[in-house]
Amino acid sequence: MLKSVRRLVAVRSALKSISAVRHCSSTSPLEYHSKPLRFTQANMDVILLPALKDNYMYLIIDQATKECACVDPVEPEKVLNAVKEMGVKLTTLMTTHHHWDHAGGNKELVSKCPQLSVFGGDKQIDGLKENVVHGDEFKIGQLNVRCLHTPCHTTGHICYYVTAGEGEDPAVFTGDTLFIAGCGRFFEGTPENMKTALIDILGELPPKTKVYCGHEYTVNNLKFALSVEPKNQDMITKMAWAQTKRNENKPTIPSTIGDEFKFNPFMRVREASVMNYTGTSDPVETMGFLRKAKDKF
Ligand SMILES: [Zn+2]
């Protein structure tokens, strides 16, 4: 099998100019909480677009057809500017869940581009056209997308698993289910739901799968992680790396599923070191304990 070659490059002049380009209705320059980034793989580009205070939107581009999808396009102006700058064709919106900071841009985008497909797993999602369930698949050009139902943060939360054939690392867009070194709050679900989502669904993806999540929470998540396992060398190393990135105003995205098992306490609920901290020998009880502790952290 061809070894995947992955390059991480800061977006060159095209994306640099995004912040300077204004939509016709805009009166102020666009602002980003981090630097936009472009991740180039063999057949697929992922453009990371910071939004609001700490959200991330993503463009997923099929290089063969230049067809493009956007995950959680809460700031339509930034999305449309990036689409224009990249010279790609936006056909699809992929919404992870109904919260406004993820789905809040759908209606405006559909009003401007009525032909857009809008995927999601919850009827509460603004502008929803395709109500998907676990295992549903669709295409972005030649890229394949599989919907993973991960109820807990919200009952209709969907993660999107994107594959592009041999030689390409898969990618999963996890919204507010899985963060780097953390997970979303259990607004509409139980510890058991999150254990299923993180361990039995996302945890079963290939370890090299890239994780693109919905918020920049990594440093705070690692502070909590280190309170659970102060001697975990992977957490210590990741924290130093993440702090350096944030000091440079750079995103800490993506990680991989394999790495999350090393430094994410919510992915480590079966580890003795984590269960010792929570005082139980049950992964689901451990999940519940960790979430309560994190909520108060
Ligand atoms: Zn949310």
Image: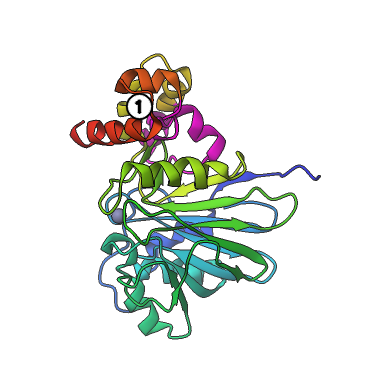
Point 32% across, 49% down: residue: 33
Point 37% across, 35% down: residue: 284
Point 35% across, 29% down: residue: 222
Q: Position of residue 158 (x, y in %)?
A: 43, 59
Q: Spot the residue most to the right.
A: 1
Number of other residues with Cα within 10 Å of mark 1, as a class: few under 14, some 14 to 19, many 20 or more: many
Q: Position of residue 170 (x, y in %)?
A: 62, 50
221 left or right, relative to 201: left
Which image quarter is the C terminus in? top left
30 left or right, relative to 207: left
Q: Which residue is mark 1?
A: 225
Q: Does residue 73 sit above or below 268 in this rendering?
A: below
Mark 1 Cβ and ligand 1 under 8 Å apart = no
Q: Does residue 191 sit above or below 53 in this rendering?
A: above
Q: Pick the residue in front: 45 or 183.
A: 183
Q: Is residue 252 rendered magenta in the image?
A: yes
Point 57% across, 46% down: residue: 9
Q: Position of residue 268 (x, y in %)?
A: 44, 29
246 left or right, relative to 117: left
Q: Spot the residue most to the left.
A: 296
Type of residue at label 1? Answer: Ala
Which image quarter is the N terminus in? top right
Q: Does residue 231 sit above or below 241 in this rendering?
A: above
- Specify the segment rendered in magenta: 241-270
Q: Pick the residue in front: 51 or 233.
A: 233
Q: Pick the residue in front: 13 or 54.
A: 54
Q: Position of residue 171 (x, y in %)?
A: 57, 51
